[in-house]
Image: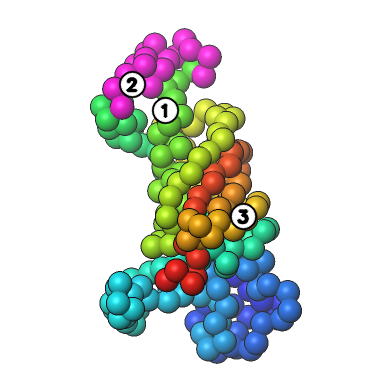
Amino acid sequence: MQNHSGCVLFGMAAARASPSPVRVIGRMLAGRYDGIHGFLPAARARPASDDKGNDMSSGKLARTQGLFFEEFMIGDQSESVGRTVTEADVVNFAGLSGDYNLIHTDAEYSKGHIFGQRVAHGLLVLSIASGLAVRLGFMEDTILAFRGLEWKFAAPVFIGDTIRLRVTVEATKPMPRLGGGLVTLKMEVLNQKNETVNRGQWTVLCRSQDQS
């Protein structure tokens, strides 16, 4: 990632200038601007503390903490790393869920199906998306509850496809009686061809900063 002068913001002294009035890189969900170190991913933003407020770790191995409700800004966006869907994923999910539908588990049958080959379970892809969201770091220790979702399986995901998750903040709603607020997130799962294969909205309850 670069600032307007072309200087890389991660770990370079040239990037230590104060941020402009415009949010740095759209103030990505996965990080924040630090006047000393530049733009840091959320995984390095601040160490977690115990219930007494004591720092539980320090330095590069510090436990991560996500964003509080007040820190989510409409329009903020971040994108995860990629994750290749393997045959082992499909087989394990079939065993876990009990869904042994032939379009997931029978290669010969699937050759004559509309997709021409086996497809990953839609709910497997949704589950992987939830893991990719957690890896972004913004939910670590500050999410109180997953309140709901609307989801569409827009295109098939095949064994061997590599998917990633794009997250955009769409709305926020304070919920003081619950100790935080609701954050509505637009979720898009894209494959290696940059095609949207799953999409929808998630609503999560995030802890307020004054409850920390």
Few, some or many C-alpha atoms within 10 Å of disc 3 (few <14, some 14-19, many ≥20)? few
The quadrant of the image that shows the N terminus is bottom right
Q: What element carries label 2?
A: loop
What is the C-alpha distance between the residues marked 3 and 1? 33 Å
Marks 3 and 2 close (CB-CB < 8 Å):
no
Q: How many marks?
A: 3
Instruction: Provide the residue designation for mark 3.
Output: 173
Marks 2 and 1 close (CB-CB < 8 Å):
yes
Question: Taking 14 as reference, is 82 above or below it?
Answer: above
Instruction: Provide the residue designation for mark 1.
Output: 121
Q: In the drawing, does residue 108 fall left or right of residue 73?
A: left
Instruction: Provide the residue designation for mark 2.
Output: 99
What is the C-alpha distance between the residues marked 3 and 2? 37 Å
Question: Taking 123 as reference, is 10 above or below it?
Answer: below
Residue shown at 67% from the left, 59% from the top: 74
Q: What stretch is highlighted in magenta?
A: 97-115
Few, some or many C-alpha atoms within 10 Å of disc 1 (few <14, some 14-19, many ≥20)? many
Q: Is mark 3 on a helix, strand or loop?
A: strand
